[in-house]
Image: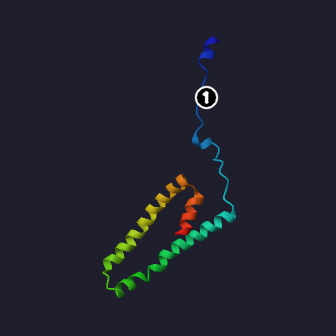
Amino acid sequence: NSQESLFPTMTPPTPPSQLPPPSTPPLERRQILPLILIAIVSNSSYSCIAPILPLEMDKHQIPQHWVSLIFLLFPIGYSLSSLAVSRLFEKVGTGKVIAIGMGL
């Protein structure tokens, strides 16, 4: 009996499939709608410029390869800035980042 108290039995860890889901509250409808609208507006801005930019660049005699380069680099820059902003959310806080974004 004295050895049992010195070496307690250990239970094996619970497999991830049997762990309870994280306790994050689900988003409500009033929280999801603004996110959907923001996604639609931000994506539509890119699709609105797609038919116009090549015409404007031809009008100003800018070579076609610059148009292609702009359309290539915009989504890459958008993705990289999204990563930077997500880290900024963690450090500064959501409210401050949104206020800065609205001020820009």
Residue 27 occupies quadrant: bottom right
Q: Position of residue 70 (x, y in %)?
A: 37, 73
Q: In the drawing, does residue 38 fall left or right of residue 65?
A: right
- Callout 1 amino acid: Thr
Q: Is residue 103 above or below residue 20?
A: below
Q: Please state if 101 lies on the left or on the right of 65 as rendered.
A: right
Residue at 33% across, 76% down: 66
In-front residue for pair 95/30:
95
Q: Judge by depth and name the residue closer to the eye, 49 or 84.
A: 84
Tell me what residue is drawn at x 65 percent, y 68 percent: 33
**Coordinates of residue 90 in the picture (x, y in percent):** 54, 53
- Residue under the image location 56 percent in, 72 percent down: 40
Q: Residue 13 falls in which quadrant of the image?
A: top right
Compared to residue 4, the image places residue 65 above or below, namely: below
The residue most toward the bottom is 59
Viewer-side residue, 63 vs 5: 63
What residue is shown with label 1? 11
Position of residue 34 relative to residue 11, above or below, is below
The front one of 16 and 36 is: 36
Which colour scheme appears in the figure?
A: rainbow
In the rendering, at what x and y percent does residue 97 appear? 55, 60
Mark 1 crowd level (few <14, some 14–19, many ≥20, 10 Å Cα): few
Tag 1 secondary structure: loop
Q: Residue at x 58, y 39 (%)?
A: 15
Q: Quadrant location of the N terminus?
A: top right
| Residue reaching furthest to the top | 2
Q: Quadrant of residue 77?
A: bottom left
Position in image of residue 99 (x %, y %): 58, 64
